[in-house]
Image (cartoon, rainbow, N blue to C red):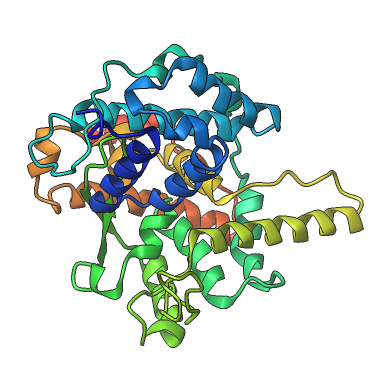
Amino acid sequence: MEARKGSFAELIESCVKDQEQQGRETVYQTRSGLERNVTKAYPGIAAKKARDVTPDDIVTILAAIHNRASETESVRVRALLHACFNFGIKGDYDPTRTAEKCFYIQYNPVVATKRNNSAMKVGQRVLSHDEIHQLWHNVGDTHRVGFVMACFIRFMLATGGQRPKQLLQATWDDYDFVRNCITLIDKKGKAGTTKIHVVPLSQRALSILEEVKAVSAGYPWPFCSGATGRKASNKGQVLPITIDSVKKAFIRYNEWLSEQAAAEGKPEHKNFSARDIRRTVKNILIDAGVNREQRNLLQSHGQTGVDVKHYDRHEHLPEKRESIRRYDALLGKIINGEETKLVDLEEYRQQIK
């Protein structure tokens, strides 16, 4: 019985493998983060039986991360450890699990530790209309931001601020050029539940796809430059653009804007990231008179429960098309540098009635 009791390290490995089987996108970050901060940093704690790990052990691990001024990582590692112990508590009683090791965990030791809420900053950056106009027209001229990458950044805007990872992983087969829509796989959420999210494509979005066809028509993904993987798991394989490449593109574009501002004696540029595009689009949707329910449908927010699990993926397509139509009309004015008149919400409600 004692030999069957799994160690803390074995608990982590078992949890990570379970995430791999679920196809979780963050499994690589989970494995590397826990190896770096737990199993390699504290082999003594990792060797303990999982049921014998105490809140003091967890505090030791988190304090080391905090003391090197990595507060955000400390919060993330705490969340990962919390998930690992919850997995262990339930895993012993999972009839589908066939692992030799059991953990016999009676309580989650992470619960007793304090969460550093101040480290998780909620983003507030929203791009102005001028910034959107400039991004649309100038991102392709930025040094070391390629043609396909520039098209993808514009595509993020054109499709209503969809999650970039989902757009990058969509293949040509996921596009329906009869109905003019794209089917995205949404695995967002703690439960890792797979949801189907269908997004209508405006003429603006379709035009961008026509542009990238010249480069990526022979690849499985539209947003693929032909680059190959370097890791052992994908070395030599052609891959779509990665989210890390998108982050670097925004860094380079921000650097270019900062240089421009300094050269022209303008106020210091305030950086933004790909994450801020989604928030910016939401504000444009509000300005275009799209109500909250329709905004959530378009950006795949808050769709949970049995009804959503079994609904026809095209059921809400007409509402999404109307949202995209209103949004694209305002986006077009912003891109063209025209004066934008905000929609009167009361007038819009009367039209709906």
Residue 186: x, y in percent?
A: 28, 49
Q: Quadrant of the N terminus?
A: top left
Residue under the point 80% across and 54% down: 258
Q: Quadrant of the C terminus?
A: top left
**Residue 87 location, quadrant:** top left
Q: Residue at x 73, y 43 (%)?
A: 270
Looking at this view, is 313 or 48 the one in front?
48
Residue under the point 49% across and 23% down = 58
> Where does the image place residue 32, in percent across and percent down from the top left?
49, 49
The reply to whether residue 346 is visible in this rendering is no
Label total for image: 0
Q: In the image, is 98 to the left or to the right of 244? A: left
The relative height of residue 66 versus residue 210 in the rendered view (above or below) is above
> Looking at the image, which is closer to me, 261 or 26?
26
Identified at 53% across, 56% down, the residue is 333
Residue 158 higher or lower than 29, as above or below? below
Q: Is residue 206 visible?
A: yes
Q: Is residue 155 above or below residue 140?
A: above
Residue 183 lies in quadrant: bottom left
Whether residue 199 is situated above or below residue 14 in the rendered picture: below
- Residue 49 position within the rendered picture, expressed as x and y whole percent measured from the top left: 35, 28
